[in-house]
Amino acid sequence: VVVFDRIREYLGLYPKRNLKENVNNAINSTLSRTINTSGTTLVTLLAIFFFGGETIRGFIFALIIGVVVGTAATIFLATPIAYDLMAKRAKIDGEK
């Protein structure tokens, strides 16, 4: 959500830049924040996983998988798909 909001913000702030440059700059500006947030959450979850009780270990493992997969999907899957959809829409709007 943060990455997509930043893309929308950059498209409004820099309308003369091309879409690829705006998306790249938006990802670069949010990447460190995304990694820091995911990293600190992961450290906390790992501490609970190793030092917590056996009862909660399965739940924490699911949370760890969710943080890792969610972070990777946001950066490597969702943003390129959004870029492709926006580029295709711009191409269609340009043809009309």
Image (cartoon, rainbow, N blue to C red):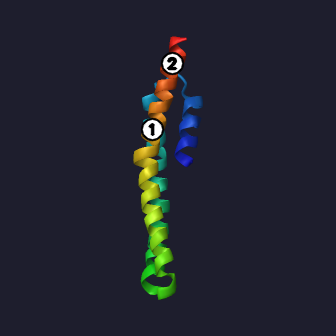
* Crowd class of label 2 (few under 14; some 14 to 19; many from 20; radius 10 Å): few
Answer above or below: position of 71 versus 65.
above
- Residue 8, compared with residue 37, is above or below; it is above
Image spot of residue 76 (x, y percent): 40, 47
- Circle 2: element type: helix
Q: How crowded is mark 1: few (under 14 residues within 10 Å), some or many (20 or more)?
A: few
Q: In which quarter of the image is the C terminus?
A: top right
Q: How far apart are marks 2 and 1 (CA)?
A: 16 Å
- Three-letter code for the amino acid on which mark 2 is drawn: Ile
Residue found at x 45% / y 38%: 81
Identify the residue at image location x=50%, y=75%. 59
- Please name whichever residue, 83 or 14, is drawn nearer the observer in this view of the structure: 83
Disc 2: which residue: 92
**Which amino acid, mark 1?**
Ile
Residue at 41% x, 54% y: name it.
Answer: 72
Q: Where is residue 49 in the image (x, y as percent from the top left)?
A: 45, 80
Which of the pair 13/46 is nearer the observer? 46
Q: Position of residue 3 (x, y in %)?
A: 52, 45
Q: Determine the residue located farthest toward the top in the rendered image.
A: 96
* Disc 1: which residue: 81
